[in-house]
Amino acid sequence: MVQPHQVIESQQQEDGDLIKPRKPPNPIVASHQHRALHQELLFCHRRGLLPRREPELQRVLEHKQREQHKQRELALHPPSDLEAKLRTIQQRLQVCELEEKKRNESQQNVPEFVRVRGTLKHVQTFSS
């Protein structure tokens, strides 16, 4: 019969040759930025300076109010010369884009042989 003490010793010798598994390091916890943020949060918590918690709906309403306030301020001030010029240029570009779009749509409705014939009129042929 094999004594239990000898079985344990033989298992330990076999285990000594194997690589023992280790828990892999967590990259988030090992990160310097994460540790600094955690320290700052702990410090703020001790001093009672936690960021205020407000419902999402309230934040959205405040954001909309700020946007409306900005729009009212912009409406009160007349546009500068540069803004007026840029607006006119933008309007011209939009008109040109609409015309080009209409032209392309009208050409798509025309049969292909008519389009090809129209392009051939512009091609010059050289006689020898």
Image: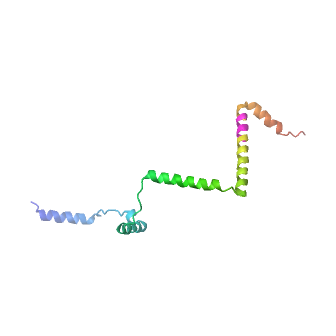
**Residue 66 sits above or below residue 125 on the image:** below
Position of 71 with respect to 112 (left or right) is left
Image position, residue 79 (x, y; %): 69, 55
Q: Nearer the viewer, residue 128 or 95?
A: 95
* Quarter that holds the N terminus: bottom left
| Rendered image quadrant of residue 100 | top right
Q: Main secondary structure of the magenta part?
A: helix
Question: Is 20 left, or right, of 95 in this rendering?
Answer: left
Q: Is residue 112 above or below residue 82?
A: above
Residue numbers of the magenta segment: 100-106
Does residue 4 lie above or below 91 as drawn? below
Q: Residue at x 20, y 63 (%)?
A: 11
Left or right side of 8 for 78: right
Using residue 69 as the reference point, say whether residue 56 is left or right of it: left
Instruction: Reply yes or no: does residue 105 show up in magenta.
Output: yes
Residue 103 picture quarter: top right
Q: How is the image coloured?
A: rainbow
Q: Position of residue 32 (x, y in %)?
A: 42, 68
Q: Residue furthest left?
A: 1
29 or 101: which is nearer to us? 101
* Residue lying at the far front of the rendered structure: 76
Q: Is residue 8 above or below residue 122?
A: below
Q: Is residue 115 magenta?
A: no
Whole-percent x and y of residue 116?
77, 34
Relative image position of residue 60 (x, y in whole percent): 48, 52
Q: Quadrant of the C terminus?
A: top right
Residue at x-position 41% and y-position 60%: 52
Tell me the residue at 70%/35% (across/down): 105
